[in-house]
Image (cartoon, grey):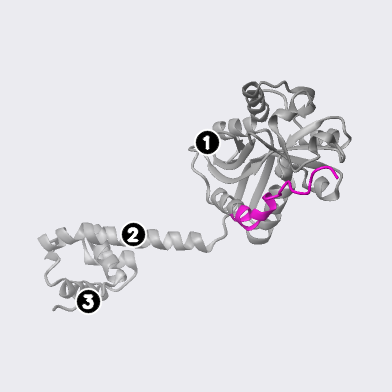
């Protein structure tokens, strides 16, 4: 069995330079090496290849048939080695640059603020810009390239254009002691004619609730239209109307006991928080890192999203 050759990349680069220059003398000048050293390296390479690679002429050198056959393989090998070096060099540097993220307002404490501190600690050269908007606005910003990443809701089962992160239940939320939320769960039909504070159309939440109400044969009594989650929480906390929210949107008030809630069932109203990436341009290295950090935060804090309705109704 013949002994495998341990190819010397430096020797292969000398070969390629000689080919490009067509002369050992010119190759020596380009490489900054004495011509005898170039000749020795070529001779060693020819010994390793088992044949002559160059024809020596009075004007320089030309490739033999063996040299012609090996040239594309050697050129490809050196290119791959250069690409590997470039990749390793890039990986050794922290990703940097501006990343524009659109997020739902309800995620400000659950994700947006923790994301800032996580990036500040681990990737300080990434400059994060956060824009808050409804799911429809976020989808539009992703479509036109205004943002790099987006965190909207999805309600349908089709999630082909985005990456699902976590599914959350919807709850009827109101002031402590409210009759509608006296039990851990409440049938959707019980919302019939109850005063509600909901986002205005064409919000995805509102459209989905309107469709569910039509199918259930009930009437949604929208006492106030407000896209602001903070307004919905404030109105519900003061007993003006019931809000329909996922628990993370009002977690501080729920844990403080100033808001109670009851999970909507029969049917359930679930929403999926998803991660979208703009198709307007390839994601930058910094954007890819922010996306990875978002996934890690959701995985690490999964229990944060799992707030049961048990014991959270009116007391």
Magenta span: 296-315
Q: Quadrant of the N terminus?
A: bottom left
Q: Is residue 304 magenta?
A: yes
Q: Quadrant of the C terminus?
A: top right
Q: Position of residue 126 (x, y in %)?
A: 63, 53
Real-space CA distance between mark 1 and mark 3, rounded to the nearest whole angstrom: 68 Å
Quarter-of-image position of residue 2: bottom left
The residue at the point 77 percent across, 41 percent down is: 183
Mark sitting earlier along the chain (3/2): 3
Give the crowd class for mark 2: few <14, some 14-19, many >=20 residues within 10 Å.
few
Mark sitting earlier along the chain (1/3): 3
Secondary element at tag 2: helix
Q: Position of residue 168 (x, y in %)?
A: 65, 43
Give the crowd class for mark 1: few <14, some 14-19, many >=20 residues within 10 Å.
few
Q: Position of residue 310 (x, y in %)?
A: 74, 48
Query: Which residue is label 1 attached to?
Result: 157
Query: Which residue is label 3 attached to?
Result: 40
Query: What is the count of numbered marks?
Result: 3
Query: Which residue is label 2 attached to?
Result: 80
Mark sitting earlier along the chain (2/1): 2
Q: Is residue 63 rendered to the left or right of residue 31? A: left
Vertical comparison of 1 with 99: above or below: below
Real-space CA distance between mark 2 and mark 1, rounded to the nearest whole angstrom: 43 Å
Q: Nearer the viewer, residue 19 or 83?
A: 83
Real-space CA distance between mark 3 and mark 2, rounded to the nearest whole angstrom: 25 Å
Q: Nearer the viewer, residue 259 or 180?
A: 180
């Amino acid at each position: 069995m013949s002994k495998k050759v341990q190819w010397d990349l430096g020797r292969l680069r000398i070969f390629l330079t000689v080919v490009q220059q067509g002369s050992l003398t010119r190759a020596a000048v380009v490489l900054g090496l004495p011509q005898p050293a170039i000749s020795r390296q070529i001779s060693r390479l020819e010994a390793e290849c088992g044949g002559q690679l160059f024809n020596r002429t009075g004007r320089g050198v030309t490739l033999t048939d063996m040299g012609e056959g090996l040239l594309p393989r050697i050129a490809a090998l050196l290119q791959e080695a250069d690409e590997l070096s470039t990749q390793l060099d890039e990986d050794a540097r922290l990703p940097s640059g501006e990343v524009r993220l659109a997020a739902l307002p309800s995620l400000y404490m659950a994700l947006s603020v923790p994301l800032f501190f996580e990036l500040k600690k681990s990737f300080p050269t990434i400059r994060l810009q956060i824009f808050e908007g409804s799911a429809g606005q976020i989808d539009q910003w992703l479509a036109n390239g205004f943002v790099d990443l987006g965190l909207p809701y999805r309600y349908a089962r089709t999630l082909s254009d985005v990456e699902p992160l976590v599914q959350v239940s919807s709850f009827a939320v109101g002031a402590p002691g409210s009759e509608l939320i006296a039990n851990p769960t409440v049938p959707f039909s019980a919302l019939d004619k109850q005063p509600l504070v909901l986002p205005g159309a064409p919000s995805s939440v509102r459209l989905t609730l309107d469709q569910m109400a039509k199918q259930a044969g009930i009437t949604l009594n929208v006492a106030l239209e407000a896209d602001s989650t903070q307004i919905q929480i404030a109105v519900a906390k003061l007993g003006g109307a019931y809000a329909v929210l996922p628990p993370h949107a009002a977690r501080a008030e729920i844990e403080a006991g100033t808001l109670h809630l009851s999970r909507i069932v029969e049917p359930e109203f679930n929403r999926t928080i998803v991660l979208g990436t703009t198709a307007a341009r390839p994601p930058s290295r910094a954007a890819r890192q922010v996306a990875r950090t978002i996934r890690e935060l959701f995985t690490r804090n999964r229990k944060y999203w799992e707030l049961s309705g048990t014991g959270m109704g009116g007391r």
